Image (cartoon, helix red, strand yellow):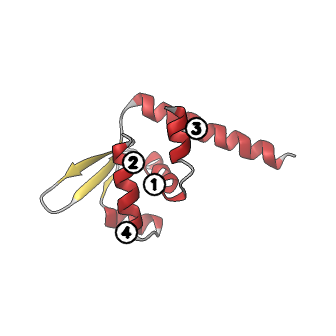
Amino acid sequence: MLKKISKILRSPIKKKIILFFRENPHSVDSVRGISTWLNLKPEMVRKALEELVKEGILITHRGRTTTGYAYTQDKNILNCIEECLSIKDEKRSSDRSI
């Protein structure tokens, strides 16, 4: 799971989306809302959101006219995300000290 999440985090758009939901873990928002918050094109955000749903990182709340996206509550996935992000932060810190 760590390798899969690490690979997902290499995508700048997916990483921005994950960080958005990490900072707002109880948020449910639409493609339009998320693209506005992140200042990204809705088409790009929609594709990334659907891929993150397939990976289990996000869940959908489907209404009649819109779909909302929310952060998973799966502890294993959340722990893997935290571990991957902390590894990247540690690597970045050690690269700066060289």
Which residue is rendered at x = 50% and y = 38% of the image? 4
Judged left or right of residue 66, residue 75 is: right
Q: Which mark is residue 52?
A: 2
For the residues bearing labels 2 and 1, Cβ distance under 8 angstroms:
yes
Q: Is residue 30 above or below residue 26?
A: below
**Residue 47: % across, % down:** 37, 59
How many angstroms separate mark 1 from mark 3 (CA)? Answer: 15 Å
Residue displayed at 67% across by 43% down: 89
Q: Residues within 10 Å of mark 3 (few under 14, many from 20)?
A: some
- The first of marks 1 and 4 along the sequence is 1
- Furthest toward the top, the residue is 76
Near-viewer residue (25 or 9): 9
Residue positioned most to the right = 98
Task: Check disc 3 and report the residue beneath it.
Answer: 84
Q: Check disc 4 and give the amino acid type.
A: Pro
Q: Marks 2 and 3: in contact by CB < 8 Å?
A: no
Q: Amino acid at mark 3?
A: Cys
The residue under the point 39% across, 48% down is: 52
Q: Secondary structure at mark 4?
A: helix
Relative to residue 12, is residue 60 drawn left or right? left
Marks 3/2: CA–CA distance: 16 Å
Choose the circle earlier in sequence order: 3 or 2. 2
Residue 42: give its label.
4
Q: CA distance from mark 4 to mark 3?
A: 26 Å
Q: Which label's residue is closer to the chain start, 1 or 3?
A: 1
**Dot 1 corresponds to which residue?**
17
Residue 85 numbered mark, or none: none
> Who comes first in sequence, dot 4 or dot 3?
4
